[in-house]
């Protein structure tokens, strides 16, 4: 059966720029290491996404529809369906005394809560590009549809892993999903910001009616120091 909007699928991919083939994202651990973008805390092997829900760039999301499980292929995506069109108005000149460290070309910075990259130094001013990463660039995604996930427990585990980088134990019974949460996630900002979104997407795209997040503690857990940020 062909992949349709709303399906939960596991997809592996490698994203690269069309002009020079620079790899900027991948679910393949070996490719990540070879491309020097490996993250030891990253999750590799493929992501679970809901087709049509914006979990990937629009051009890839659209290309998934109508394909079959096992499909391997590539799609070339223009800026407007990738990371956006480059806006010259988002390049601003900032006095160097606004920076905590001495500004240098290529340095990532944050000004008034906005992330940017220094692209040029002119006297005592630094030009900062506040455009989104890869804005204005055509990109290519090589991808493979690994599987279509049918069971609600698998859907919940996969979606949680997509958002926080690790799977959690999930049990579904009579429309209620119980997710057992590791205690350190209490202090994890990424989890605190996404748990509501995860619940909403599961309720909207499955027959799960209610999500219960369960925190379990014992003596050993309480003696451990928090590690989340």
Image (cartoon, helix red, strand yellow):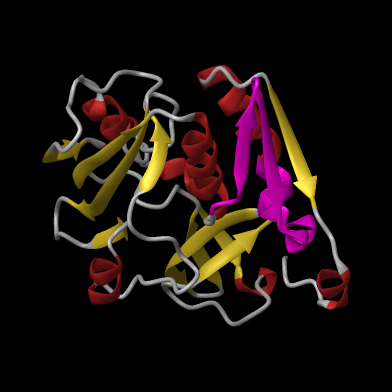
Q: In terms of depth relative to the viewer, which is nearer, 23 or 104?
A: 23
Q: Where is residue 50, by image quadrant?
A: top left
- Along the horizontal axis of the image, is 2 left or right of 130? left
Q: In which quarter of the image is the N terminus?
A: top left
From this view, report whether residue 37 is shown above or below residue 135: below
Q: In terms of depth relative to the viewer, which is nearer, 191 or 8?
A: 8
Q: Does the magenta stretch include residue 88?
A: no
Q: Which residue is drawn at 48% across and 78% down?
A: 104
Q: Where is residue 178, by image quadrant?
A: top right
Which residue of the protein is positioned furthest toward the left in this rendering? 73
Q: In terms of depth relative to the viewer, which is nearer, 116 or 202?
A: 202
- Residue 54 is situated, as x and y percent measured from the top left of the image, at 43, 31
- Residue 61 is situated, as x and y percent measured from the top left of the image, at 31, 30
Which span is picked out in magenta?
Answer: 167-194
Q: Where is residue 121, by image quadrant?
A: bottom left
- Residue 122 is situated, as x and y percent measured from the top left of the image, at 46, 71
From this view, report whether residue 145 is shown above or below residue 62: below
Q: Which residue is drawn at 54% across and 37% down?
A: 156
Q: Residue at x 65, y 59 (%)?
A: 111
Q: In which quarter of the image is the C terminus?
A: bottom right
Count the marks: how many? 0
Which residue of the protein is positioned furthest toward the front in this rendering? 173
Q: In terms of depth relative to the viewer, which is nearer, 114 or 31?
A: 31
Q: Does the magenta stretch include residue 187?
A: yes
From this view, report whether residue 71 is shown above or below residue 13: above
Q: Which residue is drawn at 41% across and 36% down?
A: 49
- Along the horizontal axis of the image, is 177 left or right of 142? right
- Residue 94 is situated, as x and y percent measured from the top left of the image, at 59, 62
């Amino acid at each position: 059966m062909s992949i349709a909007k709303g399906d939960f699928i596991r997809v592996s991919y490698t994203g690269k720029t069309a002009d020079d083939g620079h790899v900027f994202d991948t679910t393949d651990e070996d490719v990540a290491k070879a491309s020097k973008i490996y993250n030891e805390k990253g999750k590799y092997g493929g992501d679970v996404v809901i087709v049509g829900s914006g979990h990937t760039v629009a051009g890839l999301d659209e290309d998934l529809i109508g394909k079959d499980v096992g499909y391997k292929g590539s799609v070339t995506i223009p800026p407007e369906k990738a990371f956006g069109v480059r806006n010259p108005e988002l390049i601003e000149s900032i006095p160097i005394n606004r920076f905590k460290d001495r500004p240098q070309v290529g340095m990532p910075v944050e000004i008034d809560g906005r992330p940017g990259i220094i692209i040029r130094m002119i006297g005592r001013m630094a030009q900062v590009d506040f455009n989104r990463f890869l804005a204005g660039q055509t990109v290519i995604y090589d991808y493979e549809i690994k599987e279509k996930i049918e069971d609600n427990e698998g859907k919940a585990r996969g979606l949680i892993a997509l958002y926080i980088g690790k799977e959690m134990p999930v049990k579904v019974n009579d429309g209620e999903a119980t997710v057992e949460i590791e205690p350190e996630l209490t202090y994890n900002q990424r989890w605190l910001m996404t748990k509501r979104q995860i619940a909403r997407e599961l309720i909207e795209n499955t027959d799960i009616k209610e999500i219960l997040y369960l925190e379990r503690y014992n003596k050993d857990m309480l003696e451990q120091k928090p590690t989340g940020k």
